[in-house]
Structures are given as C-alpha cells and as structure tokens.
Image (tube, helix red, strand yellow):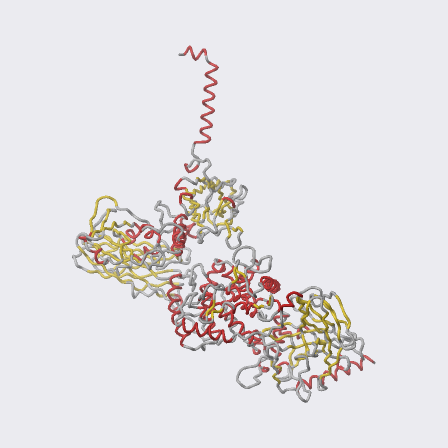
Amino acid sequence: MAEWFKKNKILCFIVGGAILICAVLLCIFLIPRDGGEQVGDTPTLTVETPQKLSISGTDTFVLDVTISSFGDAIYPAASMSIAFDASRLEFLGVEEGNVFIKDDNTSGQTLPEWSYNTAACNESGRINVMYLDMTGGKNAFSKDLLAEDNNVVLRLKFRLRGSVRAGDVCDLIVEDAVFAASDETQSLAMTTNTLTMKNGKLVIGE
Amino acid sequence: MKTTKKRMTMKIVSVMLSIIMVVGILPIVVSATEPAQDMVYISASDDANYINDKNGSPMAYVGVSLADLATIDLTAYGLGDYVYDADGDGNAEITALHLYIYTHTTIFGLDWNDVTVTGGAGSIYFAGGLFGFSDENLRYNYNGAYPADENGWGFTADRIVLSAGDYLDVAHFSDWSFYMDSAYGFHYFVDGSDAITHSYTVEEDTALSVKLMLVGGGMGSGDVSSFEAGYTISYGSSIGTATGTVTTDDSGVASITFSEAGTYYVWCDGGYGAEYPDAIVSSPANATVTVTSATSSELETPRVAQDVSATLDATLAQLAATVTAPAFGTNAGEWTVLCLARGEYYAKDNAYFADYYERIVETVNTTAASVNMNGALHKNKSTDNSRLIVALSAIGKDATSVGDWNLVEAYSANGFTWIKKQGINGAIWALIALDSNNYATTDTTIRQQCVDYILEMQLEDGGWTLSGTVADPDITGMTLQALYNYRDQEAVATACTEAITCLSNMQQTSGGFLYGTSETSESAAQVIVALTTWGINPDTDSRFVKSGKSVVDAILEYYVENEAMFEHQLGAGSNGMATDQATYALVAYDRFINGKTSLYNYSDVTFETVTPPATTEFSATLGLPENVENVPGTTFNGVVSVDGWDNEAGYKLIDMIVNVPEGLTVTGVTAGSRLMGGTLSYNLADGKLRIVYFDANANSDLTTSGNSFPIELFNITFSVGSVTVGDTFNITVTDMSLKFSSDSSDDASVENIVTDEATDSITIVEGRTFSAGVLYTGDGVDLIPADKKAVLVTVTQLEGTKKLTYNDGTNTIEFKYNAEIAETMGIAAYVALVDADIATENFENAENFTIDEADASSITFADINGDGVINAQDALAAVDMWLRTGDAPTDDEILTANVNGDSRIDTYDALGIVEAFVYDDREYAIVTKATTIFD
C-alpha cells in the first residue's frame, strides 16, 4: 500500500487538494451563521453591525434592520424582539426605514407606523416592535415594494450609557421575528425557519 | 395761499361731517329683497382702485356671513357703548360696525387696536386706522345710497342694521376736494331697469350691454344719480387684470362680447373731479358676468329657488314617527337627531332630545370607560366622537361634559394619529365637530393639523377622495363643509375655489353626481350641504345647473313620496341612511333660502352651561380564590387591582394597608408587571400588611402600561397557618392612596383610591374542591356564540398540570390548563368554552370531574396559533378572525384570542395583543378579570 502511494504521489496530492477545497467550500456555505440558522434563499432579517464606535465621539447612533427579500405573499403584520444590554445601551426609539407598505387611502405607498415603548424596552432589555395592519391586508408589506437598495425595515436609535468602556462588545440578538401573512404557511417566521436572522454586534473603541 | 385756503375748506367740511354723524341718531332697518341668503357684502377702495385684502384679493363686493358677524362681541373690542337693540327685544342687532370689525380683523388681518374710534352711540366716528387708512377721509354708501333719514342726517355704522343681501361701499379719498366736486360719488353698474346690480348673465358670443351710474350727493343734499358718459370700463377674468376695455356712450352704456363661457368681471376705476381735476372724487364699481354656453343656455330658463318645505316637513315627520328612540349609532341615531334639531321639527327642550341625551350619557359612560382613551368612543374611529359631538351640539349639549367624559378632549389626548386612522374622513369630521360649538382643544395645533392634512390630500382635479386619484363628490363636498371656517387661510381659499369648480365639472346633466359609476342621493346631499355652507344657492347658481337641472332637482328625484323617505339609488327602494342624508341636505337648503345659519353653523343654538365633571376616582378590588385547603403552609394569592390610572398625573408613590386575619400570614408581595417606575417594600405587623411602591432614588413618576383595565398593581401571597375546615377569612384593603408629593398639609398632594369593593374572603376546605366562575358569555355579535360561555375552574390540592375532564352524564368537556391565571391566583386553574345552559354550579361538583395523571392540554392567552410565541402572527390572527377572512375559530382560538375578556372577539383584542407585546408584559385583562369572578 505504501508502495502504491509512493508510485502515485502526484495523484494523491491532486485528490487530497481537491478534497480540502471541497471541505472549505462546504464550511463556507453550510456551516450555520450567527444564531444557528442556515443562510440560503430564505429571507434574512439582519441587524446591521456598524463600524467600531468611538466611546468619546459617539452621542447617538442608529442601527439598520434590513430584510433581504419577501415571498410572494402579502404581510399585514410584522414583529420582532431584539435583546440588547440595557446596562450599557439606552434605546431611544425606532426611526423610519425605507421599506414601504401599500397605502390603501392613496393607492400609493407609505411607511409603516411601528408600535413600541421606549421605557419598557429599556426596562426589559428587549426591543419589542410590532406593525399591525388592522385592515387585514390593504396596508401590507409585499415584495413589489421592496427594492435591493431600499431594504431597511426600521432603524434602532441608541445612546451609549456611561458604564460603557472601550473594548466592550454589545450584541443585539434577534430573539423572534415574523412577517405574518394571513395564511400562516406563507408567513416568514423564525419559529418555522422561514425567516433567518443575523444578529448585530457593537464594538466599542477608544 | 391756495393751499392754505384748501386746508381751511377741508377743516370746515371735516367739522360738518363730524356734526352730521353726531347728530344722525335715528335708526334705519332696511331689508334686502334679493338675494335671501345669509350673506352681506362689502367693498373698499382707496381713490381710484379697490384695495386688496390680506391675501391680495381685491375688496370688491366681498361676501360675509351674517352668522360670522353674529359671533362678534362689541364689548370685547371695547365698543360696548355701541351695542344697538333697534327693536327692543333684548337682542343686539348686527350692524355695519360688526362688518367693519370683521373686515378689519379677519379679511385684512389688522389689529383693531390701531383704529381710532370717537363719538358716542349713534355717532361713531373713525378718526383713523380703519382698514389701514391713515385718516378719516372716508365715505360710505349703504345699498347704493347714502344712509340718511328724511332730514338728510346720516346713520353711523353702529346704527346701520344689516340684513341678508345688504351691501356697503367704503371709499377713501386722499384728497378732500371730493366734498366740493360735482363729480363726486359712488359708481355702480345697473341692469336694464336701471337698478343697481353686481351681476350680469349673458350667452357666449352675444353682446352684453352694461350701464354705469354715478350716485353722488348725499350728506343732507340727497342722492344725485347720473349715467356716466365716455367712461372707461374694463373687463377680464379677475378685477384689476383687464383683457379689454370699452367706453360708455352718452347713456352710460357700453357693449362687451365674451366668446367663451365662464365667469368674468366688469369694473371701472374711480374718476377725477370736474372742479378739482387732480383729485379722485368717485369710487370704483364692479360686477360679475356669468357667460353661459350657447348649448346649455338654450335649454335653460331662468330659475327661481324652489321651495322644498313640503317634502322636508313630510320627511321630518316620518323620521320623528319611526325613530322614536334614537341612540348612539349611524342608523336611527345622530343623523336623525341632527335632522330633527336643525330642521327645527322639535324644540331643543323637547323630551325627544332629553331622552336621547339620557341614553347617550349611559352609552358614553360605558363605552369611553371601556375604550379608556380620554373620552374616545372607539380606539380607531374618531368619527364616532365627531358624529356624536355634531348631534349633541345641534341640541345645545356641551360635548365637553357628557356623563363622566369630555368627548372633545379625546382629540388632543389621542392626537392627530388617532384622527388620521380614518384617513381624510377623520380629519374632516374632527373639524366639523370641533367647530360646531367652537370647542377649545388643549392641543391647539389639532385643527391646523387637520387642515394641513386635508390640503395635502387634494387631488389634481381639485377635489378629494377616500381612495384613488379621482375626486368623489361625497368627500369633496364634506371637505368643503369642513374647510369653510378656515377660508381666511389663502391656501384653503385657493383649494376650495378649485374644489367648487371641480364639483361643478362633476355634475351630471341630471343635476346629480356620480359616486363611482352610479348616481346616489348621498352624493347630491353632500354637495347641497357644501354649497349652502359656502353661500352658493344649489338650485339657481349657474355653475350647478346643468341642462336645466339643479342638484336640488336631482335629490328630489330620489324621494319616495308615499313613504316620505329617500332612495340611495333610483329604483333601489327607500333607505334609512339615504333618508337621513337627503333630509339634512334639504334642511341645509331650506335654512339657506330662509336666511338661517348653515347646517353646521350652530351660532343660533343656545348651549347649556355645564359644570366641570368631578375628578375621576379610581376604585380598587381584591381578588382571592374561593376555597383554600386546610393544610398548613398551603399558599394562595390575592390580587389588588384598580380600574383606572392617569399616566400624566405625576403619581410619585402608592401605599395601602391590607388587613390580614389571624391564621394567615404573608410570604411575599410582587408588583404587577404593568406597573412601572418604582420599587416595592412591604411589612406585616399586627395583622396589617403595609405596602409602599415608589422610586426612592429618582423620585420618578409611577406609570402603567397598556390601556385595558382593571390593572393588577400588587399580588400578595398568603400562607395558611393553623386553621379549621369551614373557617372563613375576610381580607380587606384600606387606606390606599396615590401621592404626588410629601406635603401632607396639601390636600391636592394625595388622591385616595376607593376601597369599598376591595374586600374578599376565602373558605378553608378539606381535600380537593372545585370553584367555578364565568369569565364571559358570548353575545353572538363577533365570533363568540351567544350560547357559549367561558368557564374558569380552580382546584385545590392539585399539583402540576394534570388533565381535567368534566362529565355530567350529558356533556363531556376537556378543560385546558392556564398557567397565567394559575400563577396569578396561586391555585390550579383551568378554562373551557362550554354551552351557556350548563349551570355554573355543576362545575363546582367534584363528582363531575376526573383527573388523570397525564398532562392537560393548555392554552396561553394571545398565543392563538399555539406555537409558544406571541407575536405579530397572533395579532394578525385576531384581526383576520374579526374580518372573517378564514374559517370560524375553534374553541381554543376563541379562548386564546379574547384577551380582553369581553363578549366578542374584535380589534380590541388585536390591539390588546399589540400593547402587551410592545410593553413586554403578558398580563391581559382576562387574567385580572379572572381574579375577581369569585367575589
């Protein structure tokens, strides 16, 4: 057997190299990302990670929450629960994104009004934000109103608390998220793995 | 020398003028015969030209509503001495002084304090500042003549009593020579019979003869009229911008031909003197020219405003006879009351309205408390408040105090976001409601937010719509009604001018209007109300008569005579809503042609004086399980709840005492998850549990989350000591208060909570017992059948979540374990939706139950899809249930969806889920309610 390897040394290198490349590619595409969900064609909700924040030069900052795509359904409701370290970050509120919903009043489009409570979020360390179209679909999210360069669902505004130190890392973890369709099988939901997520991470520098 | 002589002459004339005005005290009351509307008119010129108002429009025969003038209180302008009661009936007359004030302040936007007023009552004299003129060189004509008695003495502004159709011309001359010049006077256009007119009508491409007259003299010499020969008359689409001129002949006549249908103007400038050729000594004149198209003109004949009183009377009588007990709602409710009140079928003090008001007070107290949004009657529909305010104001009831609630405050407290939930409709009706009695709002921007929002929504065609890009007549009509009171804003005036044109363009040859593809009586009704609000006769104004048919003709087509009702569409049969709208449209028209205030202008209504409502008191309740087993160390919970909370009040501390009887002890107290802002301390001593909740460090305000009540404040865990089976222990809450500050000497520093109902008892039992209560029974309206009720069963001596099955020989029911109620009450708790005719006592009979060791199925409130996560999917499920977009809900879906614990599943439940989610708590009203059902 050893004699065979000696005789076919070049072939062995080639085969071994090919196996190594395949393994690397598999790692890149199949190993789960943050949160343990597999990333593929499944729509992904992302809390965008900003560049390192300066502890001295930062007053307030905003994190975008983006969606990669929608399915064919319309989504009259959406919610997300995002945990954060309330001892080091003060949540200041939600700002408008640029993903529109249909506007039944004008037959055009408008931005959704998200429900949230700043005090409750800071008390619990969890940002619970929800949009609910009480018409059941006339003012809903849909893929025809989602553009590649306009995919910010909402923006989270924060301020660093005095307890933050350079070198701290603050995770923003999506605990639950759903873009709900009336037919639940069409919903994009973390609970059913029809919506994947990427958590955000804040790195505090000098 | 010449200048000195001239000044001397001027002074003499000035003195003469003052004397004339001082002496002229006899009143005159002149009523105009045409038009019989609510409007009076005023022109103002400076030398040769009309002056412009604050928006840049010429002050040429500008209409002002008498209703608007009636709102002017002379006393408020320091002119109380000039209040005039000509007929001695105790009511002050509306005089030219009112018109001057309105013109000066509202039309010109000037400060009345800049006007110098001298002279006594009957001889008021404007020495300077009026309309921005720097001196007193003013002359005025009233209805085309100098207002003088038989002796030639003039009437001053405070003695000129105005009636509908009257007009005043005020001219300022910078050179006093006009007093001595023979060419002095006021110019007027006259018709074929030489009567003064401000309007001509002619067919396109047909020569129009206009005639110009000068009315001079006056001031004791009598009026001298002559026709102006060789005088230049201009014409065009707007006064001051001429597209051509003509010159009058020796008879004062000039001929003009307009080639296109439309609205035009003719006017002349003031002229120079004969003896003083460098001075302007006469006023300008103007008239509107309506040019009709040849085709329409051929079909049309001159119209006389028709009398609809017979139809109106019959319809009002029918409404009164069939809607005998109007109540809160769109049908047989506010609109009917509006018709009967503004149609003056019943007097304001009639029992019909008094009984209605009683019903409304009851409804408002219940509904507003349930909604709990500062007087809102619906969480999403501000028009519920608006509709009711419009009706209540029509019968003289102050909407700021209806039962325990201020319906007006809802707009400020809930903000424009609440109003906007219904789109433009919400904003329109908010304005109409707020202006119905000029209600003040604590948020003073609310009205303007509505106006701005409406203006933003205007379509390119000039109208408005609920949805789409093409104007619909209903919304355009209603918008015009709402914006009338804001017409002084330039943007509003422009928008409404466009909208009126838009309506005219939308009118069909039937005289009616299309809503979508069909003509409806409701569309015609809203247009009639809009036009009458704006002082436009919907039956005769040429813009609203098509092929000889007016919108009044159109609406009468829908009248079903033998029923005294109206149809929605022709041939569709009579309809309640169509009848309401058509009736109040006829009321509006009838009021218009009889010179009364417009439909929603309630300045003619006497409002009752109300006393402010007493400060709202909160009440507390205590909820306990019914039975507790006799094993020492057994624990159970008591829940202290309140039925209200004011997050704006600034509460700093809450404290209370709980009387704990001997045999029981307290092992813990927790604050409710919806109570925020403080930390909890407590101590049990001598049978009294003292609880205090406040923020000792930051002294921050105590608040609660969500809008559903009652709300759990504290949960007390009691432990059983040495007790005997059959013992009953009463536990009471006393001395519960909310404190604003530490100043005990200040009564206002504390708000006591009523604790009369904050008492409950438990009974010590042996072994396993069952207690049952009804959480709610369906009302058959929204998804929960009327023959179903939700039952809560609590079980003593039962650990874990064992399966509980009810079987009475007829019914077999598997109960669902509910952890939320169990944890709150400290006892095993199960729920089920059962037939309402099963006696609740049957669920307290242990023989009817079997308990298996296997785990029970469980339900979690709001987790409608049962996936273990409460999120937007569940909130949407509640909405979809209410919208009936899917299958009928299962019993479990009803149990989980009805989070507010009332008799139906509706959008309140969806909003309850949203609120609990964003506040990150999971305490729903149904849980708090569960703690009290054994009281």
Along the horizontal axis of the image, is B637 left or right of A162?
left
The percent coordinates of residue A11 (x first, y second) are: 47, 15
Along the horizontal axis of the image, is B781 left or right of B571?
left
Count of residue discs: 0
Give the farthest residue toward the right.
Answer: B1
The percent coordinates of residue A157 (x first, y second) are: 49, 48
Along the horizontal axis of the image, is B454 left or right of B204?
left
Along the horizontal axis of the image, is B462 left or right of A11?
right
Q: Is residue B488 visible?
A: no
The percent coordinates of residue B190 (x first, y second) are: 70, 76
Give the farthest residue toward the bottom.
Answer: B151
Q: Nearer the viewer, residue B347 or B281?
A: B347
Q: Nearer the viewer, residue B674 or B573?
A: B573
The percent coordinates of residue A46 (x first, y second) are: 47, 41
Q: Nearer the viewer, residue B386 or B809?
A: B809
Q: Is residue B762 visible?
A: yes
Which quadrant is the N terminus of chain B positioned in? bottom right
- Seen in the picture, residue B375 relative to B36 is either above or below; the reply is above
Which quadrant is the C terminus of chain B positioned in? bottom left
